[in-house]
Image: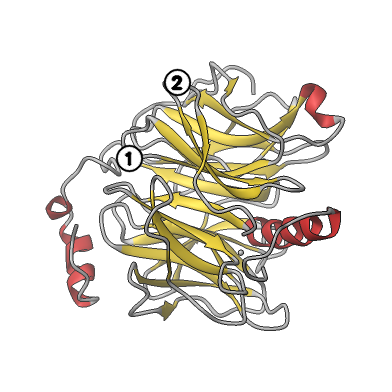
């Protein structure tokens, strides 16, 4: 997501990157009794005073449960592809003194909480297709880039070039490709690369910023947020992974952010301030709002959607006739 190919140094550059990234990302008890059956949405949110926590709900917003304990600043969660694990950035404990964020993992019921990255400033996490690694962005003073952590060996590897801002990775659930935001071309645009950082290619190139990308669960299609020039509000777009067939889905005075596909690929979950506090909404692929998920208790900071009946990296595309029909209309080839 800023000017091209020059060393990043100093607090001013770091602040600029963090301000943009937070604008993109932001744009509510006890031990869990949540059923592991059925579709569910995990999200970060403020609810009342204090820091944000991780919550879980159903797609219709019928039930809400808090998963984290209020001990940290917990936000922007991501499901593993098998639905057993939730990853999220958190600032907690002694890290609050210097505001050092690390990536944490926990079980789907909120148990077994543990840090898996070293920090500082680790945000925007996504799982590999086999759930054996995570990719995330690091926003340090002199180190702004995308890293991969092997969850078996705890090895942390930077996969983007130094001197270039890179963040907000999303790992394709079927395949070996990561989409992310980078300033390699002089503005914050979408790029793709292999899991090891090879084959970096730009998807967008414009003066406004693009980011917050999310892979379709089984197809070569990406949802993302695009900001117009001069600090315009964000709107949700889709396009093929080669940068073609771009479509704008939302157009609202309030900024729409953080799109995430439904498990079957027929709807998109996103956050918006269109009703006041930042809330979760679900829309169809023509941009029509299906429902509002969260209520006035919550100010949302990122979300993700999982359904055990439509695992993201396992089910063949052909099982979902509605998804296949939509993809044929977009003339998008299945993987």
Q: Residue at coordinates 66% horizontally, 75% vertically from top-left?
A: 233
| Image location (x, y in percent) of residue 166 | 58, 56
Packing grade of label 2 (10 A; few <14, some 14-19, many >=20) is few
Q: Quadrant of the C terminus?
A: bottom left
SS class of the residue under badge 2? loop
Q: Residue at coordinates 18% horizontally, 61% vertically from top-left?
A: 334
Q: Is residue 329 visible?
A: yes
Distance between the alpha carbons at the discs numbered 1 and 2: 17 Å
In the orientation shown, which residue stands out farthest toward the left?
A: 318
Query: Closer to the camera, 54 or 288?
Result: 54
Q: Is residue 260 visible?
A: no
Which of the 4 image quarters holds residue 5? bottom right
**Coloring applied to the structure:** secondary structure
- How many numbered discs sit on the rendered protein? 2
Asked whether, in this view, residue 277 is left or right of residue 325, the answer is right
Q: Which residue is mark 2?
A: 153
Query: Closer to the camera, 23 or 39?
Result: 23
Q: Residue at coordinates 46% horizontally, 42% vertically from top-left?
A: 58
Query: Closer to the camera, 203 or 267?
Result: 203
Instruction: Choose mark 1 or mark 2, whichever is in front.
Output: 2
Q: Residue at coordinates 67% horizontally, 62% vertically from top-left?
A: 27
Give above or below for 250 relative to 334. Answer: below
Q: Which residue is mark 1?
A: 129
SS class of the residue under badge 1? loop
């Amino acid at each position: 997501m800023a000017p091209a190919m020059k060393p990043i140094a100093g607090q001013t550059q770091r602040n600029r990157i963090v301000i943009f990234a937070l604008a993109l990302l932001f744009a509510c008890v006890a031990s869990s009794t949540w059923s592991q059956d059925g579709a569910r949405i995990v999200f970060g949110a403020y609810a009342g005073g204090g820091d944000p926590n991780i919550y879980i709900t159903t797609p219709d917003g019928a039930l809400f449960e808090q998963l984290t304990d209020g001990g940290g600043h917990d936000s922007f969660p991501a499901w593993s592809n098998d639905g057993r694990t939730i990853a999220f950035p958190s600032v907690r404990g002694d890290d609050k003194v210097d505001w050092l964020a690390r990536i944490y993992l926990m079980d789907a019921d909120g148990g077994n909480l543990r840090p898996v990255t070293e920090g500082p400033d680790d945000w925007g996490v996504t799982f590999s297709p086999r759930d054996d690694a995570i990719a995330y962005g690091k926003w340090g003073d002199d180190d702004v880039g995308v890293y991969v952590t092997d969850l078996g060996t705890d090895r942390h590897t930077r996969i983007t070039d130094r001197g270039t801002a890179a963040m907000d990775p999303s790992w394709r659930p079927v395949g070996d490709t990561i989409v992310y935001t980078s300033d390699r071309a002089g503005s914050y645009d979408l790029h793709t690369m292999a899991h090891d950082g090879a084959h970096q290619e730009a998807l967008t190139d414009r003066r406004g910023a693009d980011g917050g990308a999310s892979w379709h669960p089984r197809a070569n299609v990406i949802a993302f947020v695009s900001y117009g020039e001069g600090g315009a509000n964000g709107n949700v777009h889709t396009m093929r992974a080669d940068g073609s067939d771009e479509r704008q889905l939302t157009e609202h005075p309030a900024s729409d952010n953080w799109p995430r596909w439904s498990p079957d690929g027929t709807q998109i979950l996103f956050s918006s301030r269109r009703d006041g506090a930042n809330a979760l909404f679900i829309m169809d692929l023509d941009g029509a709002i299906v429902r509002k998920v969260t209520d006035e208790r919550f100010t949302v900071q990122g979300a993700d959607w999982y359904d055990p009946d439509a695992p993201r990296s396992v089910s063949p595309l052909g099982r979902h006739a509605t998804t296949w029909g939509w993809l044929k209309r977009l003339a998008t080839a299945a993987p």
